[in-house]
Image (tube, rainbow, N blue to C red):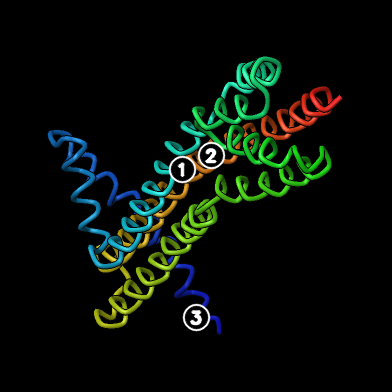
């Protein structure tokens, strides 16, 4: 048992020594290289096969995030202006004119308004039910595929930590084969362990920023939808009187 603890203790000191030595050598060797070259070299050193999985997680996560951001920006509507237009249309041309305004306006709020106006002849209560029901449908459309981003956020650092474990296993295997504990023997495995962890954390951080922005954008749109729906019901009550 003491022998094992001694080996682990020596290995720990060698680990930190190898880390300092590796980064010092890289800093000296890469002074004349561009950022792109350094990034590419570190990616290759971390193992293209394993690092490729982390890169795929980043690409897929960014693709979904960009698609959601574009969709949410297109779904953003000036609700005050829309309500004023619907109110004027109801006063001047009735329900059909108000529906035409909604048809010519993009975004989930206009779609919800249209569903409510389409059922106003059945009563205000039926129109309100239609607004609430279709509001849930539109909320689902806003949140579509967002859960995949959170999956990649959780998956990227886990893959990085897995690479750390694999790198450490490789370092111990090198020690066993060489029958020698020295920085030169374990540096390769430790470098793989560090690089996979760093890349995994970077991917998670990037996707987390996009995820938080998307969630905040969805919350803002949903709040506007709820406020506008209440205002629409009030307009319909006034119109039916």
What label sits on residue 4 in the rendered view? 3
Q: Earlier in the sequence, mark 2 or mark 3?
A: 3
Q: Residue at x 66, y 40 (%)?
A: 118
Q: From the viewer's perspective, is the residue at label 1 or at label 2 nearer?
A: 1
Identify which residue, 201 or 87, lies in the foreground: 87
How many residues crowd around disc 2 within 10 Å: few (fewer than 14), some, or many (20 or more)?
many
Callout 1 secondary element: helix
Residue contact at pointers 2 and 3, CB within 8 angstroms: no
Q: Earlier in the sequence, mark 3 or mark 1?
A: 3
Callout 2 secondary element: helix
What label sits on residue 68 in the rendered view? 1
Image height check: is 3 above or below 42? below
**In 3D space, how far apart are the residues under numbered discs 3 and 1 (Cα atoms)?**
52 Å
Q: Residue at x 75, y 39 (%)?
A: 121
Q: Is residue 98 left or right of residue 163?
A: right
Q: What percent of the width, then of the height, locates residue 25?
A: 22, 46
């Amino acid at each position: 048992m003491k022998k094992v603890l001694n080996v682990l203790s020596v290995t720990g000191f060698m680990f930190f020594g190898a880390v300092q030595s590796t980064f010092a050598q890289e800093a000296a060797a890469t002074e004349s290289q561009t950022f792109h070259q350094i990034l590419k070299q570190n990616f290759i050193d971390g193992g293209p096969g394993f690092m490729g999985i982390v890169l795929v997680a980043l690409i897929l996560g960014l693709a979904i995030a960009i698609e959601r951001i574009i969709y949410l920006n297109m779904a953003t509507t000036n609700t005050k202006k829309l309500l004023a237009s619907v109110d004027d249309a109801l006063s001047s041309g009735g329900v059909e004119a108000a529906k035409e305004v909604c048809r010519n306006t993009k975004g989930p709020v206009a779609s919800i308004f249209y569903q409510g106006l389409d059922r106003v002849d059945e009563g205000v209560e039926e129109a309100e039910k239609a607004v609430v029901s279709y509001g849930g449908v539109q909320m689902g459309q806003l949140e579509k595929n967002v859960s995949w981003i959170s999956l990649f956020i959780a998956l990227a650092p886990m893959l990085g930590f897995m690479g750390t474990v694999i790198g450490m296993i490789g370092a111990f295997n090198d020690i066993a084969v060489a029958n020698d504990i020295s920085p030169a023997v374990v540096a390769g495995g430790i470098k793989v362990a560090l690089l996979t962890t760093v890349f995994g954390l970077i991917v998670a951080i990037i996707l987390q920023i996009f995820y938080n922005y998307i969630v905040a954008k969805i919350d803002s749109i949903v709040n506007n939808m709820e406020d506008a729906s209440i205002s629409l019901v009030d307009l319909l009550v006034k119109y039916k009187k």
